């Protein structure tokens, strides 16, 4: 199986997990928490596959007067930050996967409100992310259908690059989490919200399953509409 095929399958899995996270009623709180943890681990190879684009645009985004390129870069950056913070705030109210982490675990207060905010931000940014990269996605799928080269052999130098880049992604995500934690603790914002125990609820296949199916259909539709609109505006 080619590298391009593997990446398309990875992106499909990421998309399905993200839809499932948007509708926790379809999975229940246990699977919801585990899916959120797995999501971040799968985001790392997704970012590694896009590393040439990240490196090139990180250097050029503020130098070239290309507003579409800047907008796309900033949306992707906001997407990554929101995703990291959605996962982090989810950990802080975890009732299953990480109930022992942090003194605020297992409660809904500021962390619960923040988790809901960043989760909704991820949903909106997913639509924009797909819209801004619609041509790339379609072209990638077409090239895969036409056939592509097999996976090349991995050299030690390439492996070291992958390790370093993976660590860079993890360190960056960790820095965001530390900054938001220090900010919350130093400003005592947690004291302004009433807390209550987190509820461990099972999956509700109706209407949870319908919401999951609707998400699979509607998010690409909204992304296509945004792509058509942005194609005219930008």
Image (cartoon, helix red, strand yellow):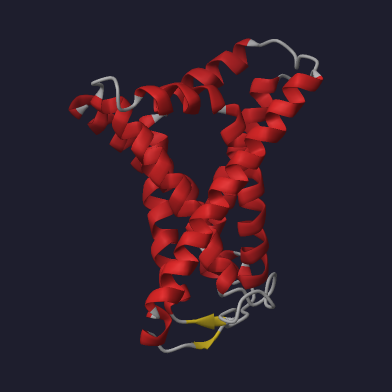
Quick one: 164 or 155, which is closer to the camera? 164
- Residue 222 vs 28, above or below: the answer is above
**Residue that appears at 28% across and 27% down:** 68
Outermost residue, front side = 186
Quick one: 71 or 1, which is closer to the camera? 71
Residue 230: x and y in percent read 25, 31
**Residue that appears at 42% across and 52% down:** 123
**Residue that appears at 74% across and 28% down:** 160
Left or right of residue 200: residue 151:
right
- Residue 22 vs 103, above or below: the answer is above
Q: Quadrant of residue 116?
A: bottom left
Left or right of residue 53: residue 132:
left
Location of the N terminus by quadrant is top right
Residue 94: x and y in percent read 61, 73
- Look at the image and tell me whether residue 156 can be seen: yes
Left or right of residue 124: residue 67:
left
Location of the C terminus by quadrant is top left
- Residue 26 vs 102, above or below: the answer is above
Outermost residue, left side = 233
- Look at the image and tell me whether residue 22 can be seen: no
Left or right of residue 163: residue 70:
left
């Amino acid at each position: 199986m080619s590298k391009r095929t593997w990446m398309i399958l990875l992106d499909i899995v990421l998309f399905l997990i993200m839809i499932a996270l948007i509708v926790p009623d379809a999975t229940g709180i246990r699977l919801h928490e585990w899916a959120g943890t797995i999501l971040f681990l799968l985001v790392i190879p997704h970012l590694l596959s896009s590393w040439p684009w990240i490196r090139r645009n990180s250097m050029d985004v503020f130098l070239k007067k290309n507003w579409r390129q800047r907008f796309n870069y900033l949306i992707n950056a906001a997407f990554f930050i929101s995703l990291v913070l959605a996962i982090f705030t989810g950990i802080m109210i975890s009732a299953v996967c990480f109930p022992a982490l942090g003194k605020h675990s297992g409660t809904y207060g500021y962390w619960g409100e923040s988790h809901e905010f960043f989760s909704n931000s991820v949903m909106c940014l997913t639509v924009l992310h797909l819209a801004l990269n619609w041509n790339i996605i379609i072209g990638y799928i077409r090239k895969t259908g036409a056939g592509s080269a097999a996976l090349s052999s991995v050299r030690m130098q390439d492996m070291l690059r992958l390790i370093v880049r993976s660590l860079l992604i993890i360190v960056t995500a960790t820095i965001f989490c530390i900054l938001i934690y220090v900010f919350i603790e130093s400003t005592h914002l947690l004291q302004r919200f009433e807390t209550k125990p987190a509820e461990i609820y099972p999956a509700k296949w109706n209407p949870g399953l319908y919401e999951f199916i609707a998400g699979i259909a509607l998010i690409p539709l909204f992304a296509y509409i945004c792509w058509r609109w942005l194609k005219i505006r930008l």
